[in-house]
Amino acid sequence: MTNSDIEKAVKDPVLLATVIGALIDEENTVINVYEIAKTLKIFIKYTVFESNQGGFYIPPEDEGDIHLVLINAEDIITRQRFSLAHEIAHMLRFQYNDVTTNTAKNRKKEEYFCNKFAEHLLVPKHKLKTALEAFENAPFIDFSDIHGFARRFGVSFSMMTRVLAYRENKIEGETDDRDLTRRIDLYFQSPKDDLKQYWNHILNLYRMAIDA
Ligand SMILES: [Zn+2]
């Protein structure tokens, strides 16, 4: 990978994610987004935001060369990973295309670009294809099977569902954004047997310790 590879890809979020994903060891399924940040010489600082913001990219000042990414310390790890991937896109867009959120002609489009990059970096097409092989004969993926995919890629259940719905057309039924959000909420509101069993198991372990 050379700088010119990035320059060529910097206007296409999917291509850019492929180029950047190739920076690290292909062996692991869960993409080590921290390793990628390190390779790109990005400094990460955990902080608490007043807003619900997941991350923030700060370009180097004048002659300095420190690219700083702030990550919301209060977020769960799957969101932190997504935020870091998103901010990596902002960094690359600044460094190779001179675009920042503030200078972008269309801010919304710029954010969309970075989200799309993050999604494709964390769930690369070829790795998703491998993961889907086990479901080759199933026209759709059941919600109860999405956990496995989400764990495999280290992303949230919600993001995994959207990838399977919009990229692969593997979610049955109503899948426009609002419907999907409602369906995911409903799914988590009614505890599933496997989750109940898991928590009972954990509670029993605690009970043992407390009783002793
Ligand atoms: Zn952004």
Image (cartoon, rainbow, N blue to C red):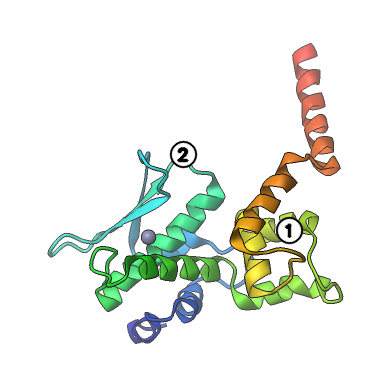
Q: Is residue 127 above or below residue 195?
A: below
Q: Which residue is mark 2?
A: 74
Q: Earlier in the sequence, mark 2 or mark 1?
A: 2
Asked whether disc 2 touches disc 1, contact meaning CB atoms under 8 Å apart, the reply is no
Question: Which amino acid type is marked by label 2?
Answer: Glu
Secondary structure type for disc 2: loop
Question: Which amino acid type is marked by label 1?
Answer: Ile
- Give the farthest residue toward the top: 211
Q: Is residue 132 above or below residue 189?
A: below
Residue for point 43% across, 41% down: 73
Q: Is residue 151 left or right of residue 177?
A: right
Which label number is shown at residue 146? 1
Q: Residues within 10 Å of mark 2 (few under 14, many from 20)?
A: some
Q: Quadrant of the C terminus?
A: top right
Residue 10 can be seen, yes or no: yes
Residue for point 45% across, 76% down: 13
- Give the farthest residue toward the left: 62
Residue 195 image offset from top left, x and y in percent: 79, 40
Mark 2 lies within 8 Å of ligand 1 (Cβ measured): no
Q: Is residue 210 left or right of residue 12?
A: right
- Comparing 37 with 80, the one in front is 80
Q: Quadrant of the N terminus?
A: bottom left
Residue for point 27% across, 67% down: 100
Residue 211 image offset from top left, x and y in percent: 79, 12
Quadrant of res 130: bottom right
Which quarter holds ligand 1? Answer: bottom left
- Comparing 51 with 124, the one in front is 51
Residue 178 image offset from top left, x and y in percent: 60, 57
Q: Is residue 12 above or below residue 196?
A: below
Residue 147 image offset from top left, x and y in percent: 73, 54
Mark 1 lies within 8 Å of ligand 1 (Cβ measured): no
- Comparing 144 with 199, the one in front is 144
